[in-house]
Amino acid sequence: MMNDALRKYLTETGQPVTEKTLRQVLRQEMPEYLRALKSRATRTSSKRGAG
């Protein structure tokens, strides 16, 4: 997910990755990525408890 976003950004801009750019991309992508992880963990926990 994050790799795809970074790859897309780099192909669109054609500029080298700077620390500032990388931080900006991570700030945009991390919240969504962490929500997805939390959602998966919650579903996994529910499945274990239901069995």
Image (spheres, helix red, strand yellow):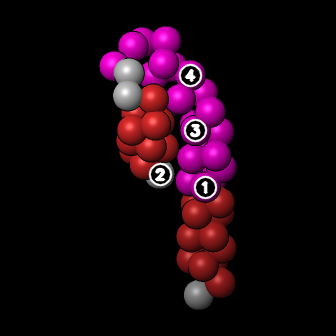
Quadrant for the C terminus, please. bottom right
Counting residues from the N terminus, which is met first, the one under dot 1 or under dot 4?
4
Name the mark on residue 1: 2
Amino acid type assigned to the residue bearing label 3 in the image? Glu
Circle 4 residue: 24
The secondary element bearing badge 4 is classed as helix
7 falls in the magenta region: no
Proximity of marks 3 and 2: CB atoms separated by less than 8 Å: yes
Q: How far apart are marks 2 and 1 (CA)?
A: 10 Å
x 63%, y 70%: residue:
43
Specify start and end residues of the magenta stretch as a single range. 16-38
Neighbour class for label 3 at 10 Å: few (<14), some, many (≥20)?
some
Q: Can you see residue 25?
A: yes
Nearest-to-viewer mark from 2 and 1: 2
| Disc 3 versus disc 1: nearer the observer | 3
Q: Name the residue under label 3.
A: 29
Please report whichever mark, 3 or 4, sits nearer to the chain's N-terminal start: 4
As measured in the structure, the alpha-carbon distance from the residue carrying label 3 to the one carrying label 4 is: 9 Å
Residue type (three-letter) at the residue carrying disc 2: Met
Residue 21 magenta: yes
Q: Earlier in the sequence, mark 2 or mark 1?
A: 2
